[in-house]
Image (cartoon, helix red, strand yellow):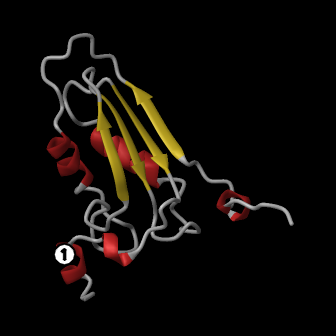
């Protein structure tokens, strides 16, 4: 029996976004709360809730040079906007001052579930 990965069944989609910015001097370290504030401005195109409250953002890492790395997922691997979501997240975070670089990677493990949603998102979608 051959081992198969989820990626074997997915159409070709851009699964990451990277942009390096030219900030020579870091005046202030970016805080995770600032990143989250920008992420909450990115709405799921099919559901009127932001990606952060939907539980689609798995990790946010910020180093001392303000390089930010984000791992995110989608509610469904066959989402028609899968190729554009990492770029949308990256563009939102790029607005932060003192940012050196942003990398957004689409991951599929752990699998997304409704349990990852915030209480606000569950209330907005009438999920209990």
What number of labels is visible?
Answer: 1
Outermost residue toward the top in this view: 24
Tell me the quarter of the picture where residue 21 sits: top left
Find residue 68 and report its image quarter: top left
Q: Is residue 18 positioned above or below 56 on the image? A: above
Where is 123 relative to 44, above or below? Answer: below
Horizontal side of 102 relative to 125 (left or right) equals right
Which residue is rendered at x = 55% and y = 48% of the image? 15
Where is residue 85 shown, x and y percent of the image? 44, 54
Q: Is residue 97 above or below residue 83?
A: above
Residue 50 screen position, x and y as percent: 27, 64
* Foreground pick, 23 / 30: 30
Residue lying at 26% horizontally and 52% vertically, measured from the top left: 39
Is residue 120 shown left or right of residue 94? left
Quarter of the image for the C terminus: give it: bottom left
The answer to whether 64 appears left or right of 14 in the picture is: left
Q: Position of residue 13 (x, y in %)?
A: 62, 53
Q: Which residue, given by chain and number where applicable, does mark 1 sit on?
A: 119
**Element type at mark 1:** helix
Q: Which residue is drawn at 15% across and 45% down?
A: 33
Extreme residue toward the right, this view: 1
User: Which residue, as the protein is rendered here, is positioned at the far front?
Assistant: 1
Determine whether 66 is above or below 109 in the image.
Answer: above
Residue at 86 percent across and 66 percent down: it is: 1
- Rate crowding at label 1 as few (under 14), some (14 to 19) or many (20 or more) other CA atoms within 10 Å: some
- Residue 48 place in picture, x, y as percent: 29, 73
């Amino acid at each position: 029996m051959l081992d198969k990965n989820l990626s074997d069944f997915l159409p070709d989609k851009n699964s990451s976004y990277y942009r390096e910015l030219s900030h020579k001097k870091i005046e202030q370290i970016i805080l995770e709360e600032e990143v989250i504030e920008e992420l909450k401005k990115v709405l799921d195109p099919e559901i009127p809730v932001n990606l952060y409250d939907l539980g689609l953002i798995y990790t946010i890492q910020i180093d001392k040079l303000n390089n930010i790395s984000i791992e995110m997922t989608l509610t469904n691997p066959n989402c028609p906007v899968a190729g554009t979501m990492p770029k949308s997240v990256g563009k939102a975070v790029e607005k932060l001052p003192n940012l050196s670089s942003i990398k957004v990677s689409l991951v599929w493990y752990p699998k997304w579930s409704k349990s990852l949603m915030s209480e606000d998102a569950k209330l907005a979608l009438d999920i209990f």
